[in-house]
Structures are given as C-alpha cells and as structure tokens.
Amino acid sequence: MTRLGVFICHCGKNIARTVNIEALREKAATLPHVVLAKDYLYLCSKPGQTMIADDIREHRLDKVLIAACSPRLHGKTFAQTAQRAGLNPYLLDMANIREHCSWVHIDGAEGTEKAFSIIKGGLGRLLYAEPLEPFQSPVTKRVLVIGGGVAGIQATLDIANSGYEVYLVEKSPSLGGHMAQLGETFPTLDCSSCILTPKMVEVSQNEHVHLLSYSEVTRIEGNIGQFQVTVRLRPRYVDETLCTGCGDCVPTCPVVVSNEFDQGLGARKAVYLPFPQAVPAVYTIDWDACLNTDKLIICENCYKDCEAKAINFLMEPQEKMVEVGAVVLATGYELMPVARIGEYGGDEYEDVIDGLQFERMLSASGPTGGVVRRPSDGRIPQNVVFVQCAGSRDPEHGIPYCSKVCCMYTAKHALLYKHAVPDGQVYVFYIDIRAAGKGHEEFVQKVMSEERILYLRGKVSKIFKSGAKLVVWGADTLSGRQVEIEADLVVLAMAVIPSSGSQKLARTLHIASDLSGFFSEAHPKLRPLESNTDGIFLAGAAQFAKDITDTVSQATGAAGKALSLLANDFIKLEPTISEVEEGICRGCGLCVSICPFGAVKMLPSTRTGAMVAGINPILCKGCGLCTAGCLSGAVTLKGSSFKQIFAQLEEMV
Amino acid sequence: MPPVKRKLFNLDQYQVPRGKVQIISERCKGCSLCLEYCPNKVLAWSTDYNFKGYRYPVLEETEEKYCISCRFCEEVCPDFAIYVTTEPELTAKPQSTQRK
Ligand SMILES: Cc1cc2nc3c(=O)[nH]c(=O)nc-3n(C[C@H](O)[C@H](O)[C@H](O)COP(=O)(O)OP(=O)(O)OC[C@H]3O[C@@H](n4cnc5c(N)ncnc54)[C@H](O)[C@@H]3O)c2cc1C
Ligand code: SF4
Ligand code: SF4
Ligand code: SF4
C-alpha cells in the first residue's frame, strides 16, 4: 500500500491570504492513500524541511507531495530534503498552489477549491511516479573559448594556466579584438597594445592552448561536460606552420585594399598581416581581393617571393572536431554603422567618422602615425565635434539602451586631441554623462575643466556639408538655445551592438539572446556569467556593452565557472529524459526528424535486429517532443509518463 | 546613399610592382583574352591591323603606369603574343583603381 504524505505551505501570507489552509488540509487528509496531511508557515525554511524529513521517516511515507510554490523555485530544495530522509527525490513532487493559484485568485472559496484540485491532480500523478536515479556523465577536461578579444584571451589564459587544455576559436586572422585597435585606454591612459600584446603572445606560447584563428564554430552537439564541436578553418592560403612572418610576400603583391583593422582608413595588400603585433604572426591572403580565383591561378608574385614556400593557393577549408566539457562565449561587439543615421550624413561625408576610426588615428601604429587628420584632405582639424549617444538611447534608431563606454571614450578622445592640437577647439554634445566606474567621474571632470573643451548638453539634429566644412546643428538645453557649429571633423560615438553573426551562433549553440541581440544570462542578478544552457558561459561585450575592466572581470569569472565544472570527474545529469520501448517502436523514424537536439538515431534492436529508435541520454534534454510525436506511443518521458499525466488530468477534471 | 570610400591615409607607404608589356603584334589573332583578363584594363585595341588582318592589343603611353605586372595577359595568351617584363626599379605608388 502506498503511504502518501501531503505538506501544505502558507508561504507567509502569499498562499494563506487566499487559500483556506485549514480546510484544504482537512480535505486533503481524506484523499485515498494519504496517511499524513500537514501545513506549515514556511516549508522551505530549515525547521520546515526538518519537519518533512522527520515525518517521512516516522510515518514511513513512500511518496510526498509538497503543495507550495513553483518547482522552478524550490524543486531542488525539497528534492534534497527527500534525499536526506532516504526517499528517492523523484518520489517527491510539488503542487504549485502559489503562482498557479493564490497569486491569481482573489476569492478565497474559489482559490481553496482550485488548490484542492491541484493537490488532487498532484497526488494522482505521484501515484504512478517511479524512483529514478540521476545518471553520471564523464566531464571532458577541455574548454572551448569562442572569440579572441581581451575577454577570450583572459578566459583562455586563466583556464590554461590551471593546467587544462583550451581551444580558442577566433574569426579574424589575429587575436586582440577591439582592444588591439585602441590607442590609449581610459581612465588611466595606459597604452592599449602595450598591455594587451604580452597577453596575446602568452596565449600563443602556452602549451595548453590550441589557437584556431581565421575559424568559426559551425556546429555543437552534446551537453554540459561533453560537447562535440565542429570548427571550420577558413583557408588563409598561407601555411601557418611554415610562414615565418617575414613579410617578403607583400612588396610585389599588386593589390592594395583598405584594412579592416584600420577601420577603412589605412591600406593593406591582398596578402597581409592585419597589424604588426598580430598573433599568430602569420600572413593571410584575402581571397576576395587577390587576383587569383578558385578556377584561375596566375599571379604568383607572393609565391615566388616566399622563401619558406608557405604560400599554397590550393588550400581548402577544413573541418576540425573537438570535444570539450565547457564553452566560454566571448564574441564581443561592433559599432552600429554610421550609415544607419541619415541625419548625420549616413556615411556620406568623409569627415564624419565613428569612435573606432578616431581611435585608429590616435594610435601611434595607426594609418596616420598617431596624428589626427581629416580623411578628406589630410589636414589637421581645428574644430572637432564629438556626438555622444549616436544611436544609443534612441529607440527610433532601434537602440533603446545606453552603450556604457561612449561617455568615457569621448572624454578620452577630447583630451588626447587637445594634447595633440592645443589650440584646437572641441565641442562635445551629450545627453547626460554616465561615468560610474572607478576613477571615471574624476577623469571626465578633469577633461571638462580643460580649456577649449566645451560640453554642450543636447542632441545633434543634423549634420551637413557646406564647402569644405561640416555644419552641425544641435541644441544646448542648458542655455535653451539652438547652436550651429562649423566643424572640420565630426566623431560619432556610435552605439555598441552585438558582433555580426552572434545571432547565428546563438542558434548553433541553442542559447538565448535578448531583444538587442546580446547573449542572455541565466539570471540577470544571480547567474550573470552563465547562458541558459548548462556548461556555456558568457564573457565580455558579447553579453552587453562594457569596458575593458568589466570585460576582464567577467572573463575571469567565466573561466572560474568553467574550472569548477572541470574540477569534477563526473557530473550528474537529470534522469528525466525520454526512453524508447523497443517492442512498441515500429521504426518509422518520425522522432528522429522531430528531435531538435539530434538525440534520436535509428539503431538495430538488440533483441530482434530490426531498426528502432534509440535515444542518446547525453543529448536528450527531456523536452518531450518525440514523446508527444510518436504515433505508436513507444516513447516515454521519464518522470512525466502518460500514466502520470492522464492520472493527474483525471483527478483534476 | 553609397558609403564613402575614404582615401587611405598611409597609401604612400605601399608600393606595387610595375610591368612593361611587350606585344608581338604579328602573332596576335585578336582573341581578346588579354583585354578580358587584364585586371586593370590597361590594354586597348589597335586601330590598324596586323598582317594576318587582326586588330591586336596596344598600350597607350598614358596607360603604361597602370600595368601591375601580374602577367595575366601573358598566361592567357594562346599565341605567346604578349609578355611582361618586370623591372625591379620600376615600382609605383598603388592606384586605387584595381579591379578583380
Ligand atoms: C571607440 C571605443 C573606445 C574604447 N575605449 C576604451 C577604453 O579606453 N577603455 C576601456 O576600458 N574600454 C574601451 N572601450 C571598450 C572596449 O573596446 C571593450 O570593453 C573590449 O574590447 C571588449 O572586449 P571583448 O573581448 O568582449 O570584445 P571584442 O574586443 O569585440 O572581441 C571579440 C572577438 O571575438 C571575435 N569574434 C566575433 N564573432 C566571432 C565568432 N562568431 N567566432 C569567433 N570569433 C568571433 C572578434 O573577431 C574579436 O576578436 C572602447 C570601445 C570603443 C568602441
Ligand atoms: S597571388 Fe594574390 S596575394 Fe599573392 S601577390 Fe598575387 S594578388 Fe597578391
Ligand atoms: S525528449 Fe525527445 S525530442 Fe526532446 S531532446 Fe529528448 S530525444 Fe530529443
Ligand atoms: S601584366 Fe597584368 S596589368 Fe599588365 S597588361 Fe598584363 S594583365 Fe594587364
């Protein structure tokens, strides 16, 4: 005979306000198989849990129903209580009489009646519950890091220095991300590449790191602890193992195009190294720019000049399979294209540039050698207008959020320009200054007090060309006047947006992203470093716009998360997954096409040899789609069997 | 609005090779392959005819500086009627007119 126990929670007044607990308990006590019905103010409290555990033992309860809040909140808490009392945790179930009942009812009588029906249903379901054992899955002690900006670099080093292998996949030819493009960094004005380059070199020299540059992740399968990843290596037409980085291939290459790394302000050849400190220090042929095509190879200038014979025009894309236990996602950001803002010229004017372009001009190794120049005529600008919140905090242009770094880097830009051109005049348009980080407000105040840097509170409504100059129309809301400024150069602090391709990557990884396209964290307060898929962690600007300090902190945190996973040899996986009854399966294969996780395969039956569906327990997420889809009813979702669900429904209607 | 293509600031620091095109007009049969394949479109048709009765490629003096010595013409010519000599001292500032 089953001995059922029912525990009803008051949840302070959350439940007790609308549900008549006393009446509910009395009625519940009369239900079949119920040997004990109790209520308590807070079941999740320590005394509450102790009471449940004591009662399980004392009354020899073999199944327990907790009528309280949602199992999403306290499912784990009570499962542990059951375990402590020696009861299989899958023989304890929860009936949600808070979110599903007391919170949505005003009338006490109705609420109590519904709570009773939820409890009856729960008991019906529990009657057919069977003990389940979590199964163990080994943890592959390797980590995949996607994105080689400062976030990816930091996470990689933290993990590799703990002795674990890391695969670092970077889309572009070199590590470094946007930090490598910056001149000096706020608020301390540290030289960006001076602090980043040593880290990049460390990555390339660490024996635990496998650096896959010019590569992308195209497929990922598996589960926490065991991911199978497919990486596509784009052909760089230069053999990485042979290239010495001498650069002899460059002079005779006849093709000159603009360099992405210089944000289109500088040149490079078709065979190139994006910047001198690039890691790996291996040249790449930009196949779109190279005169050769897949069908026609005629130009051999670089090939002839390469003494190491590293150039290979016949290189093909390669696929590499790697197995890892955890993934750190660090794909960073991009700036919203200036073309999206028509009022500011929509990228029509050469002298309206974005923040990263200005940053390239400030950089000593940039295309102007660190001198600020007008792109149109190369002259040094005397009047420079900076426009903050260009696209940000502007739902009309699709960006409701604050990009977080623009106030700071604009102040930095204004200051560095002033250092270079002391008699130049700077105007900064801002909505308000957000400088909440350590040392940030002090930095902005210092810049604001500089001579010839004028902060104007207001938005810019229009930028247009008049002769060789640009005219900026804006508002100065503090004086209440419209202002018109003649500028030589306008720098737009464009909104920070997720890097292109991150939506596709989110689909590949089965993780969620928010409305703006940044990867979603599992909980905004308590689990900011985890995605909603176990074992996939987030770092840097891929999660949201942030500065280098925050990026590095988050990357170290994500590495810590991955490391604490790797500290286990096995992890426990939920047994609530689907199972096929071979005798009933007729081998139609429908479930194979239904399963979004590729967990079902047709395999010969061990008994009859006929083809039947088999479910890989590591890949199955227990979503139940195949269970519902199978026409023969051959698939059971453990913990939610048909018997359980129908019994629950029968009791409730 | 088409996005501006900005002049590249450090173009001066780059050099591209320059070639000297040699045309043996008598061998030409007017197939036009060299004109088609020249990525910089430096070649043009002659106004007169060779002894076989074909127009053949010519290089206007003003165009000479645009030859980047890629040797596409040399490779594609079926009749060995055109070839390129490179002179190491002949390098040029890059032109931004390169086409694929
Ligand atoms: C104009 C400007 C000035 C700034 N100045 C400062 C400053 O002075 N101080 C400061 O603290 N912060 C500054 N910042 C912010 C700083 O740039 C960021 O905090 C930092 O770069 C974020 O690093 P990240 O690694 O998260 O992203 P990123 O630097 O964007 O790196 C991401 C990397 O991932 C790669 N990637 C993208 N997608 C994929 C993919 N699908 N697969 C593989 N690889 C991929 C990219 O190629 C890139 O290498 C500035 C930002 C701007 C726009
Ligand atoms: S083969 Fe391509 S990359 Fe090499 S020199 Fe010729 S155009 Fe440049
Ligand atoms: S329940 Fe079925 S469909 Fe869902 S993941 Fe598992 S095998 Fe795939
Ligand atoms: S070498 Fe190249 S650029 Fe010069 S003419 Fe021949 S095809 Fe044209």
Image (cartoon, coloured by chain):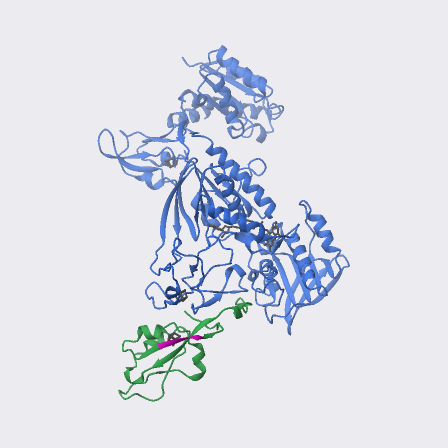
Chain colours: A blue, B green
Q: In this view, does A592 lie to the left or right of A346?
A: left
Q: Which quarter of the rendering shows the C terminus of chain A? A: top left
Q: Which quarter of the rendering shows the N terminus of chain A? A: top left
Q: Main secondary structure of the magenta part?
A: strand
For the residue pair A513 and A241, the one nearer the viewer reads as A241
* The image quarter in which residue A19 lies: top right
Q: Can residue A331 be seen at all in this image of the molecule?
A: no
Q: Can residue A93 be seen at all in this image of the molecule?
A: yes
- Give percent across and percent down for residue A477: 74, 57
Q: Is residue A458 left or right of residue A3?
A: right
Q: Could you tell me which residue is drawn at 49 percent across and 46 percent down?
A: A203
Q: Could you tell me which residue is drawn at 64 percent across and 66 percent down?
A: A489
- Give percent across and percent down for residue A478: 76, 57
Query: Against A147, is A123 above or below?
Result: above
- Give percent across and percent down for residue A637: 38, 30
Query: Against A638, is A169 above or below?
Result: below
Query: Against A93, is A527 above or below?
Result: below
Q: Which residue lies furthest to the top in this view?
A: A58
Q: Could you tell me which residue is drawn at 49 percent across and 73 percent down?
A: B93
Query: Against A113, is B65 above or below?
Result: below
User: What is the span of residues highlighted in magenta in the rendered image?
Assistant: B84-89
Asked whether A337 falls inside the magenta stretch, the response is no
- Give percent across and percent down for residue B4: 54, 68
Q: Residue furthest right?
A: A479
For the residue pair A397 and A631, the one nearer the viewer reads as A397
